[in-house]
Image (cartoon, grey):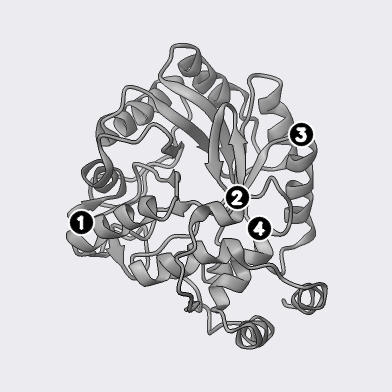
């Protein structure tokens, strides 16, 4: 934990424009809120409702105005969207809620077929609207798997944007060709892809392309790394290089990873998630951490 007599807010990390919406670069991802332990599992253990609501309210208090969510973020008894609705509605004018469509989870919690038709995608958009209690969605990301054309699916979302159900469009888990394909159909304000310290060349290329096109790059698993849904350290513990920098600076390993990520470009946003108020405060404070060239060089050698 960072120790300071003055609370650091999300403004310390700077801001970015998602279309006509201004967000602080340090946001909050809600995937971990509905449960304790690994996310996106049918047998997940629900998180205490009051704790989850307290985390969301504290995030907004700390200046976080960019939330990442999805209708498929749920556990038995808990849904990220409905927690957001309960904690934060009526919503502040500057709060931007980004959601995603494509993946499908059945009420049982098991995974179903990805939405690929206009009707299925509209149904997912409407479900997000219902759960969040909104008449439109600020940003909707089309999340895909594989390398197939996304023209029909993205075109269907572009039509919903024209109809006023969606304000801005983004992409998730995509390749460079998908970004170009989407941009030929409608504006893209963000790309959510895996990325963090030790990212392979293809992930670095996506970050670079987004910067060239003025598109926000929003990494997921920036803290968890290979731990993915299990969370940080889920694959056997934190890297020693990251821990060394953290010890020398008197900060957490998560803060080092977030500071490194934000330092990759002004167009890079962060959406770390947690179910702990203390971890939330720690993550937000990472926006004020600036790594030195020597530290960056050491972390560049981190696998």
How far across and down, in percent of the image, does residue 50 sit? 18, 60
- Residue at the extreme top of the image, as rendered: 163
Q: CA distance from mark 1 to mark 4?
A: 34 Å
Q: Say which element carries label 4.
A: helix
The quarter of the displayed image where residue 123 is located = top left
For the point 48% across and 75% down, the residue is 4
Mark 2 is surrounded, within 10 Å at the Cα level, by few (under 14), some (14 to 19) or many (20 or more) other residues, namely: many
Q: Which residue is mark 2?
A: 269
Q: Using the image, tell me which numbered label, if any, was put on residue 210.
A: none
Give yes or no for contact between labels 2 and 4 (Cβ–Cβ under 8 Å). no
Q: Which of the two discs, 1 and 4, labels the residue nearer the N terminus? A: 1
Residue 300 position in % (x across, y down): 78, 73
Q: Earlier in the sequence, mark 1 or mark 3?
A: 1
Quadrant location of the C terminus in the rendered image: bottom right
Q: Which residue is mark 1?
A: 76
User: Which mark, by number, is residue 262?
Assistant: 4
Residue 250 falls left or right of residue 95: right
Image height check: is 173 above or below 156? below
Q: In this rendered view, identify the residue nearer to me: 195 or 272.
A: 272
The label number, if any, that marks residue 213 in the structure image: 3
Of the residues under marks 2 and 3, which one precedes in the sequence? 3
Gap in angstroms between the C-alphas marked 2 and 1: 30 Å
């Amino acid at each position: 934990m960072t120790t300071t007599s003055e609370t650091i807010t999300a403004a310390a990390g700077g801001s970015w424009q998602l279309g006509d919406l201004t967000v602080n670069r340090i946001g909050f991802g809600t995937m971990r809120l509905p449960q304790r332990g690994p996310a996106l599992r049918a047998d997940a253990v629900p998180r205490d409702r009051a704790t989850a609501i307290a985390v969301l309210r504290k995030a907004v208090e700390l200046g976080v105005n960019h939330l990442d969510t999805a209708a498929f973020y749920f556990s038995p008894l808990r849904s990220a969207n409905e927690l957001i609705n309960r904690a934060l509605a009526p919503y502040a004018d500057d709060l931007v809620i980004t959601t995603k469509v494509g993946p499908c989870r059945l009420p049982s919690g098991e995974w179903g077929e990805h939405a690929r038709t206009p009707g299925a995608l509209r149904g997912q958009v409407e479900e997000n609207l219902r759960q969040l209690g909104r008449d439109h969605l600020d940003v909707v990301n089309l999340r895909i798997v594989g390398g197939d054309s996304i023209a029909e699916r993205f075109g269907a979302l572009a039509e919903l944007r024209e109809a006023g159900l969606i304000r801005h469009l983004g992409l998730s888990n995509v390749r460079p060709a998908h970004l170009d394909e989407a941009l030929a159909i409608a504006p893209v304000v963000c790309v959510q892809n895996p990325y963090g310290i030790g990212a392979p060349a293809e992930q670095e290329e996506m970050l670079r392309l987004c910067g060239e096109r003025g598109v926000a790059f929003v990494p997921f698993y920036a803290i968890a790394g290979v731990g993915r849904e299990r969370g940080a350290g889920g694959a056997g513990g934190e890297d020693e290089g990251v821990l060394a920098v953290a010890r020398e600076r008197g900060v957490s390993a998560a803060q080092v990873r977030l500071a490194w990520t934000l330092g990759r470009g002004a167009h890079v946003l962060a959406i770390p998630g947690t179910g702990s108020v203390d971890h939330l405060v720690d993550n937000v404070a990472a926006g004020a951490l600036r790594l030195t060239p020597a530290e960056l060089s050491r972390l560049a050698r981190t696998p």
